[in-house]
Amino acid sequence: GIQELESRFLVPGDLLILTGNKVQMPCDAILIDGSCVVDEGMLTGESIPVTKTPLPKMESSMPWKTQSEADYKRHVLFCGTEVIQAKGACSGTVRAVVLQTGFNTAKGDLVRSILYPKPMNFKLYRDAIRFLLCLVGTATIGMIYTLCVYVLNGEPPEEVVKKALDVITIAVPPALPAALTTGIIYAQKRLKKRGIFCISPQRINVCGQLNLVCFDKTGTLTRDGLDLWGAVPCDRSGFQEVHSFVSGRSLPWGPLCAAMASCHSLILLDGTIQGDPLDLKMFEATTWEMAVSGDDFHIKGVPAHAMVVKPCKTASQVPVEGIAILHLFPFSSALQRMTVIVQEMGGDRLAFMKGAPERVASFCQPETVPTSFVSELQIYTTQGFRVIALAYKKLETDHHTTAFTRDKVEADLIFLGLLILENRLKEETKPVLEELISARIRTVMITGDNLQTAITVARKSGMVSESQQVILIEANEITGSSSASISWKLVEEKSIAHSNQDNYINIKEEVSDHGREGSYHFALSGKSFQVISQHFSSLLPKILINGTIFARMSPGQKSSLVEEFQKLDYFVGMCGDGANDCGALKMAHVGISLSEQEASVASPFTSKTPNIECVPHLIKEGRAALVTSFCMFKYMALYSMIQYVGVLLLYWETNSLSNYQFLFQDLAITTLIGVTMNLNGAYPKLVPFRPAGRLISPPLLLSVILNLLLSLAMHIAGFILVQRQPWYSMEMHSACTVQNESISKLTISPTAPEKIGSNGAFTSFENTTIWFLGTINCIIVALIFSKGKPFRQPIYKNYIFVLVLVIQLGVCLFILFADIPELYRRLDLLCTPLLWRVYITIMLSSNFIVSLVVEVSALRLLITVEAIIENQALWTTFKRGFGYQSKSQYRIWQRALADDPSWPPLNQTSSSDMPECGSGVSYSNPVFESNEEKL
Ligand SMILES: Nc1ncnc2c1ncn2[C@@H]1O[C@H](COP(=O)(O)OP(=O)(O)OP(=O)(O)O)[C@@H](O)[C@H]1O
């Protein structure tokens, strides 16, 4: 019987009956009866509703996934998704069997992947730990020193232990790990303002390292809402004249018109037609209407609630009253087609197929496909049009629709013609791609569309410049006795006869070749990619180094391509919009989904602005975040080292800094600096080199070490010099009694200064000198270490930080020069003669000047090294000069290929020697092979 239960009681195997609309699925369930329209945006980021069909009934004990004729996901209602519409079949009910519950569901999988994300293996964090260990090492040395000094001075044991432990907290600042995340927090805030949301903030740093970005084509580079440009009907004599939709003229009645009206998965939701934009445009071009058969509108032989399409009253003479869509075999990217079974009212039962032209043609009776199919297709694809083919066949009426399997329906079809859709570039596409290319970031297109269309779009978008060549790689599977083969063909640029210039951004516009690597690009299809991966795996890296256009890629192939790029040590970004990009978005280092949702779980980043402008923004912010992390890290490390050096020097006299002195340095100086230092945003221009991805990089270490040595020298000089002053050790009754006395009057006594007149146990001239030197040194270091250009806005634009520094410096100088006994007493300071205060100021100023020089040269070194690594021409000079080699796989391959005169092979075909083992290639190139040995 039927029971109403709370969803938590569901267990796998339960039978669910879905009633009504807008149901949130509490579990994963297989649809066995009826059909549903589901919003899967939560899982995939895709805003278009998806139609789910029941699992076909089969008399077999095979696992259900293998029984599914196509994409098994088309029969599964996933947990967390919303069923917008549930339509019963003949029995009138929509039934599903519970497959998984709780954490075993697709939603559970997602939650798990958010809780335990894929380890990023980003060197930054590993280096941070090493850096921390170094600081711990330094602290240990300090502890041993403290033990020795205090024990030799006969201090009580608890004092010795206390002082020794103090050294650890000074040398290893507890806020150090937090410092690494400041950049990320600020960048995340700024990204949010731009409508870019992030569910995995630690990846923001990775964005700063991206050097290859893959783009999906339709909906990402080109506009989603395609305009129907025309239809090319065909009959036995071949293709007919193009019917243009531009004039608003609808297609005359015929099977092609019927196909356009009924072969789609559109739904009627609250009176509006919704679904795939392609389907929508096609249906709108027919000017037909959509309705649902019901009690007031019943058609004989058609189940209630079936979708019906009818010619509108104003439509040209149509002999049928309407067409009922009886069954749908939905579209899937992997299949590249969809099929419907329809019933013409008072007419025939028909099947219509729509999909990628090559796919559709392969299901048609060969004699119905015009001989000029390939050339006709090429006419449109070379112009960058998106082409869809349609086909149909008559079905027997005496069978029930459920008796037809997809295999049976999708066979022996009659080819109907082509639909030509405009594929306009988004306005932002070309400038963004140019920006990325000139910043030496590789751009790659991975699309499900036709190869020729993809090549044309790549040219028009500037991904491939006019002066660069496209080499088509075609690889074929083993057929019969012949082994797998691979051929290389130069794509010749034909003058476009039917060019429709209005459709595109001006293609004549000059594209700057600055920053382009290589003068050729490889283009290949998903099928060839698959064959190359299996049979020519040794060629794959060489192809990927210059592979730019990947067409007819299934969702699975998209993600394996991203993985292959990662194997070559590229930092890969993927920007896509649809459900077919989900895998690749998750696989990439940085997945950016263009989705209306605020934060789609389908990828770490989601951009609400539906164009690729978000990509350079993200890279800029990532770079700024990386630089911020480094600046903070350097500052925190140096600030703790300054305190460490000062305290160890004071320990020599069994003295230290007082609590208020520590507090002033920690709170008034470092905390304020830490909070404001990184408020400056990313630099608006994307420069052609990346910031160092590692903390332990020579320029960074050099800068820290040199600055540390400078501070050390200054502190030691201050410490020793103060003891040599004629007034040192004079009897002090009040902190500022010497103010007006002449130094010559002061007597020199060999004893240590007395601390009468001050309430602290810490007051001494050394303490006062070290404290002033340390505190102002912290301010100097903050200024020196704040990096602006080329990755962040200049420092002077960070007004709050500049103000904080000015106030801090002002306060410190005020304390140094103003004689306020109460303040001095509270801070455990001693008054020193004015001349000594001037000396302190001179020491600090010299430190500032030398640090500035050191830092600027360290920065120069950093930029030069980065530029050399990123610049191919300079690279060779550098390599020859210093014998330096980048360890990145793709660099190694690039160098090998640059030295190989016979690469790329052109107009050749080679075959795989060992088809079974799939690793050998008969293509041999002695120069190349010998190069390979060297690697
Ligand atoms: N609604 C549809 N009905 C039938 N065929 C379709 C439909 N949408 C796309 N196709 C065909 O299937 C092919 C693959 O589609 P898919 O969605 O994987 O990629 P795409 O939209 O062409 O491009 P991209 O991967 O760049 O988004 C398309 O090129 C087209 O020929």
Image (cartoon, grey):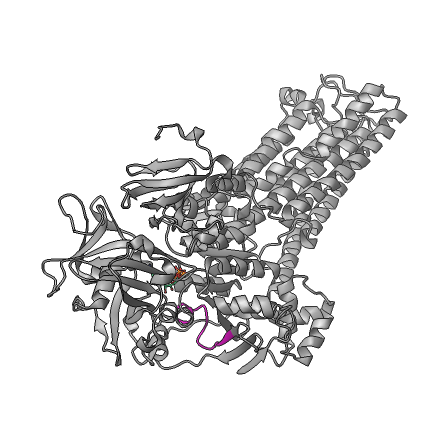
Q: Quadrant of ligand 1?
A: bottom left
Give left or right: position of 452 versus 36.
Answer: right
Give left or right: position of 75 versus 738.
Answer: left
How far from the left and from the top, in percent, is residue 871?
A: 60, 67
* Residue 69 visible somewhere in the drawing: yes
How far from the left and from the top, in percent, is residue 571?
A: 57, 57
Q: Nearer the viewer, residue 491 or 841?
A: 491
Residue at x 55% of width, y 52% of height: 589
Give left or right: position of 28 versus 724.
Answer: left
Name the image quarter holding residue 658: top right
Magenta run includes residue 837? no
Residue range corresponding to the magenta coloring: 458-474
Residue at x 33% of width, y 80% of height: 372
How far from the left and from the top, in percent, is residue 588?
A: 53, 54
Name the image quarter holding residue 757: top right
* Residue 769 visible somewhere in the drawing: no
Q: Nearer the viewer, residue 816 or 451?
A: 451
How far from the left and from the top, in percent, is residue 274?
A: 27, 50
